[in-house]
Image (spheres, rainbow, N blue to C red):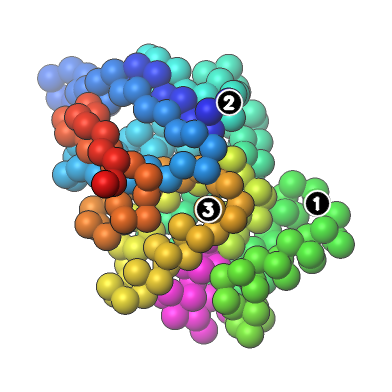
Amino acid sequence: MMALQVSSVTKSYPGPDGPVPVLKGVSLSLEPGERVALMGPSGSGKSTLLNCVGGIDRPDGGSIEIAGEDLGGLDEEGLCRLRRQTVSTVFQFFHLLPTLSARENIEFPLLLNGVAESERAARVAALVDEVGLAHRASAMPHELSGGEMQRVAIARALAIEPRLILADEPTGNLDSTTGEAILDLLAALGERHGTAMLVVTHSPQVPRICHRTVEMRDGQLLATEKPA
């Protein structure tokens, strides 16, 4: 079963002279554990595709399946469940809850899913150790550096043990050295947890941790590139 199967997806938005096509028959698949970098200029449709895959936007045509579940057959409650249990997102600006500690931010999606307290404690303890923040687990977001906040965000994304992680410019708000460390962490944790990742990025460094690079231009995928 594919972690992600996007088939002939189309999406348009209203414009002054009629609908403006943003996605033009996009097809893409990710195997379990596969990391794919999605690159292309601003306005090419990358973020729209990510929003459709994450269930934020609905495509006009085509289909999207995550771990065999067709998003087109889900109502809003079903899409919320999918985002809580199957797919996680890592954002450029971290999106941590400012009133919760690092540990509590990681635990929060588990609370939403009704995971038992003992299981929550075990998962959070393991994750803060994996991302190298056991000594900072009680710190509040405003006390953390950008790299530390992104480590918390990655741990939070992994807490639900998702089949797919969507990463939207995960190093875009970090300096180059910190960004490199975050990329290495994403790759290592993706391997360890067997999680597929679709990474939208402008960074030329991201493809080195991915199995494939896909370029999008004018709403279409142009090429798939595998490293030598």
Q: What residue type is labelled 3?
A: Gly
Q: Residue at x 57, y 76 (%)?
A: 132
What's the CA distance linking mark 3 and mark 2? Answer: 18 Å
Secondary structure of the magenta portion, mostly?
A: helix
The one of 185 and 81 positioned closer to us in this rendering: 185
Disc ID at residue 161: none
Q: Residue at x 45, y 18 (%)?
A: 63
- Pinpoint residue 68: horizontal percent, then vertical percent: 59, 24
Name the outermost residue toward the left.
Answer: 17
What's the CA distance linking mark 2 and mark 1? Answer: 26 Å
Disc ID at residue 1: 2
Q: Determine whether 107 is above or below 98 in the image.
A: above
| N-terminal label among 2 and 1 | 2
Q: Residue at x 29, y 41 (%)?
A: 226
Q: Can residue 70 be seen in this view?
A: yes
Q: Are marks 3 and 2 in contact (CB under 8 Å)?
A: no
Residue at numbered disc 1: 115
- Determine crowd level at label 1: few under 14, some 14-19, many 20+ residues with C-alpha closer than 10 A: some
Of marks 2 and 1, the one in the foreground: 2
Q: Which residue is drawn at 43% across and 74% down?
A: 147
- Pinpoint residue 15: horizontal percent, then vertical percent: 19, 25
Q: Which amino acid does label 2 sit on?
A: Met
| N-terminal label among 3 and 2 | 2
What is the magenta range? Answer: 140-154
Q: Quick check: is 187 in the magenta stretch? A: no
Quarter holding the N terminus? top right
The one of 204 and 119 positioned closer to us in this rendering: 204
- Displayed quadrant of residue 219: top left
- Pinpoint residue 112: horizontal percent, then vertical percent: 72, 50
